Amino acid sequence: MSSESEESSYVVARLLNGLKEVYTFKELEEFLGIPSQVLWRYTSYSQFPERHTAKKILDAIREKRLVEKALREALLRQNEVVEEWRILFNPRILNLVGYVIWKFYSNLEVDTVLTYPERNAGLAVMAADWLLADVAVASERAYGNWGKLLTASYVSGERGEIVYLHIPKDSIPKDSKVLVVKSIVNDFQSLNALSSLVEQARAQLVGAVAIIALSDKWIETVSRLNLKNIKVLLTWTREGFYVNL
């Protein structure tokens, strides 16, 4: 990703819209040196900043680490992870997550964003929107109107059972580059099945993203798959949580 694309008026306006979930207009005015009335027009998309203004705003956001602080405040409450629905049903938080994913993966030219379970669809759509990619959602149900299916399974340590995942055969194009995204993971064993679905589709799994990891068990899963380009935004350790952006 070029700095020129990150500094575009559209990207900065979207970023400000996400930050508005945590910061007031008065706080953003103090942080960025932009009048709150102008910021309101940017966050509502009724007006977009000029190029030099967009660069000024982005520089201030980086310097003050506003995205990192906003995500930490949104994802944690009294050093405890918030309920998953507060993440998945909050468009502004998903917008910030989408921005982070875009920064990290835009150079990989992702074609398809794959997720599971269905409640993660909003996250996948937001990531795909930032990456200009398509979306595929795996399900434990094999719907009859899906036609030909790809099917894979994994052993869920949390549920103590084998879980089967299905996806329409044509939802992952051959030779496409696929990114897996999930909200909260523990051992991330589902990645084994998702990787198998991508392989069956004759596509390429180029990376995986989790917003929150509740343990470090996912590292072993990723290592066995020899998968690079892994991004976990917030990870639990014995010392507590830390943000990795």
Image: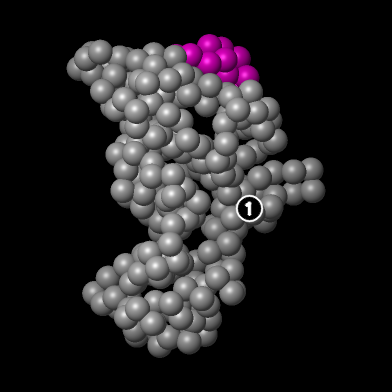
The quadrant where residue 63 appears: bottom right
The percent position of residue 146, horizontal first and vertical second, equals: 23, 18
- Image quadrant in which the N terminus is located: bottom left
Residue lying at 79% horizontally and 43% vertically, measured from the top left: 238
For image coordinates 42% across by 50% down, the residue present is 106
Q: Secondary structure at mark 1?
A: loop
| Quarter of the figure with the C terminus | bottom right
| Visible residue check, residue 187 | no
Q: Residue at the location (57% across, 40% down)?
A: 230
Along the line of sight, which residue is nearer the eye, 175 or 165?
Answer: 175
The answer to whether 94 is drawn above or below residue 117 in the figure is below
Residue 236 can be seen, yes or no: yes
Left/right of residue 54 with respect to residue 234 in the rendered view? left
Where's residue 130, x and y in %? 36, 52
Secondary structure predominantly adopted by residues drawn in magenta: strand
In the image: residue 160, left or right of residue 88: right
Determine whether 69 is above or below 88 in the image: below
For badge 1, the amino acid type reads: Asn
Q: Which residue range is magenta in the image?
A: 153-165
Residue 100 coordinates in the image, percent (x, y) = 49, 55
Looking at the rendering, which quadrant does residue 133 occupy? top left
Q: Is residue 226 magenta?
A: no
Residue at image x 34%, y 39%?
Answer: 111
Q: Is residue 143 left or right of residue 127?
A: left
- Along the line of sight, the residue nearer the viewer: 141 or 206: 206
Outermost residue toward the right in this view: 239
Which residue is under mark 1? 244
Residue neighbourhood size for the residue with mark 1, other residues' Cα within 10 Å, grouped as few (<14), some (14–19), many (≥20) = few
Q: Position of residue 12 (x, y in %)?
A: 39, 69
In this rendering, the count of numbered labels is 1
